[in-house]
Amino acid sequence: MLEIRQQYTFYGILLYIGATIFVLYMAIDEPESKVWNGLFWVIQLFICINAVAKSFLQESSGRMLYFYSIASPRDFVLAKLLFNSLLMLVMSVLSLGLFALFLGNPVQKAGTFTGLVLLGGWGLSLVFTFLAAIAAKARQNAAIMAILGFPIIIPQLILLMQLSKAAFSDSLTVPFQNVLLLVALNIMVILLAVILFPFLWKD
């Protein structure tokens, strides 16, 4: 309920998405499929940082103490993961629609690409929510996010871009084992958050 009340954050993210994609449209109009794919996932990364990573960093110490008194650490982190996952799924679908509207739609397999977008958005939100929980307990929040975040997320982004190439061609198929790998990575992040967050919570 507190997250929903802070509507200025939500509208700020919407403005960021719209302005960024419009600037890309003004700069390159309709790029070829490889460029379109790469730009889409890079924009997804920065949308996630703006939308999800701030979920812990914007919490004051007083509010965190209040949460500490009314909820268990596992319930709290799972609620954060769930809310940020839903938020990022909405943002992913919205950015996909705006990309198709302004930059053309070179996707040949819309269903496959949409599924990968949802899976990728879910994975990005889980990773950055977990990293934000760690960074919120450190003095150098931005530095911790950069140091921990990008080495972890870049391999996942590369895998997503490679998987999504199949959606731009009728002759290619999505390797199912790689999709399972992404799902397994997401589940691993959830388990790590549930196991490790209680130790941060006590601090």
Image (tube, helix red, strand yellow):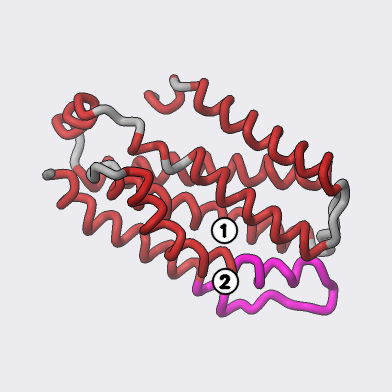
Kindly identify which numbered label has been placed on residue 190: none
> 1 above or below 47?
above
Specify the quadrant that holds the N terminus: top left
Q: Which residue is mark 1?
A: 119
Picture quarter containing residue 101? Answer: top right
Rendered residue at 70%/34% (across/down): 18
Query: Which residue in the structure is indicated by mark 2?
Result: 179
CA separation in Å, label 2 and label 1: 9 Å
User: How many numbered dots are placed on residues in this image?
Assistant: 2
Measured as percent of width and height from the top left, residue 46 is found at 56, 46
Crowd tier of the residue under label 2, counting other residues whose Cα lies within 10 Å: few below 14, some 14–19, many 20 or above: some
Q: Residues within 10 Å of mark 1 (few under 14, many from 20)?
A: some
Q: Nearer the viewer, residue 141 or 70?
A: 141
Residue type at tag 1:
Leu
Query: Is residue 169 shown above or below 21?
Result: below
Quadrant of res 76: top left
Q: Residue at x 66, y 71 (%)?
A: 163
Which one is in front, 191 or 58? 58
* Tag 2 secondary structure: helix
Q: Is residue 175 above or below residue 141?
A: below
Residue name at image x 87 percent, y 51 percent: 30
Q: Which residue occupies the foreground of this view, 9 or 111?
A: 9
Which region is colored magenta?
159-181
Q: Going by the image, does 60 lie left or right of 169? A: left
Label 2 with label 1: CB-CB less than 8 Å: yes
- Expressed as whole percent of the image width and height from the top left, the position of residue 149 reads 42, 57
Q: Residue 16 placed where, x, y %?
A: 63, 33
Look at the magenta stretch and give its main secondary structure.
helix
